[in-house]
Amino acid sequence: MEKLTPAEEAVHNRLVEKLAPLDIPKAIRVLLEIKEVMDQAGISFFLRQGTCLGAIRDKAFIPWDDDIDIGSVLGLHGLTEEKIEPVVRTLRERGFITTLGRTDDFIFVPIVKPPVMVDWECYRIMNDAVFMYPASRIPVRFFVELKKVDFIGSEFYVPNPPEEYLEVKYGPEWHVPKPPGDYEKDIINLISEGSSYGRTRRLKQAITRRLLPWRAATVMVLDERDQPVTDALISVVGLGTFRANKQGIVKLHVPCDFWYALIIKFNGHERTLFVEKVKPARKYIYRPGEEHLQASSDL
């Protein structure tokens, strides 16, 4: 599969790093165009996460949402891995910035037509469930018989029943609008530490931790005075909690280069970095008040 060009990757990374609310008129056009491509290819997809929440609760995009979330399940509705690449090629031909990547849990297809970002994830079934970001276990029964709903002037599929799916994903207060900074806590509180990801990812994490310690990502945690914090805690949602050493350095044993939700705690300070790119063997610095970890070569 053709990879993103350096220019395309720069555009994608810039949008991810500077997340902004959707341009609703452009988001509508983009989603309808993607639906047209999917329908022509015979691909069944559903609205998921925040996009599904907006469609069911608000009958519209959520004003502060920053991307469009759609999904499919491998093995259901005729979807195979071989059917994904032709869709990606068609999208590229129509001017979208897109490629595909693979993890143990899903195939992910980032789709961009600036300034709109779309995240299409094709989930693998693991023990009668799929795992949605950051590590939410969603029973596969929600995706076997999808439900059609009216949304942005067309019909789209959603998990069925959508209300129960949204409660599993967001908790019992899913119907209460919550801005960024609030709703993430509801999602995280539903995820059991170290028990949410599939067996393969947990096994890779254990191998990295015990046999390949040099592959751990390292984060130096600094306080408001820019001093290292001894015994700071960083939780990688769904994987575990790691403690800083006497130099303020935390080793994060993440299984692969991907996005994670992090919770950083020390001396009464607590911060959630809900969408954070972490690469094994890379070095980072955390400072209170900054939106993301900062890459470093000095640790």
Image (tube, helix red, strand yellow):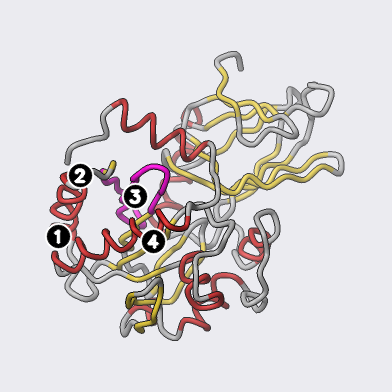
Of helix, strand and loop, which mostly describes the magenta segment?
Answer: strand
Sequence-wise, the earlier of marks 2 and 4 is 4
- Residue 115: say if magenta: yes
Which residue occupies the foreground of this view, 89 or 201? 89
Give the residue at mark 4: 28
Could you say which quadrant of the image residue 35 lies in? bottom left
Q: Which residue is drawn at 79% across and 21% down?
A: 226
**Residue extending furthest toward the top:** 298
Q: Which amino acid does label 1 sit on?
A: Lys
Q: Residue at x 13, y 57 (%)?
A: 82
Q: Which residue is drawn at 57% across and 19% down?
A: 296
Q: What residue type is labelled 4?
A: Ile
Q: From which residue to which does the magenta span run?
A: 99-118
Q: Position of residue 264 (x, y in %)?
A: 71, 42
**Circle 3 — which element?**
loop
Give the residue at mark 3: 103
Sequence-wise, the earlier of marks 1 and 3 is 1
Q: In which quarter of the image is the N terminus?
A: top left
| Crowding near the residue tagged with mark 2, few <14, some 14–19, many ≥20 C-alpha atoms within 10 Å | some
**Circle 4 — which element?**
helix
Give the residue at mark 1: 83
Give the residue at mark 2: 92
Sequence-wise, the earlier of marks 3 and 4 is 4
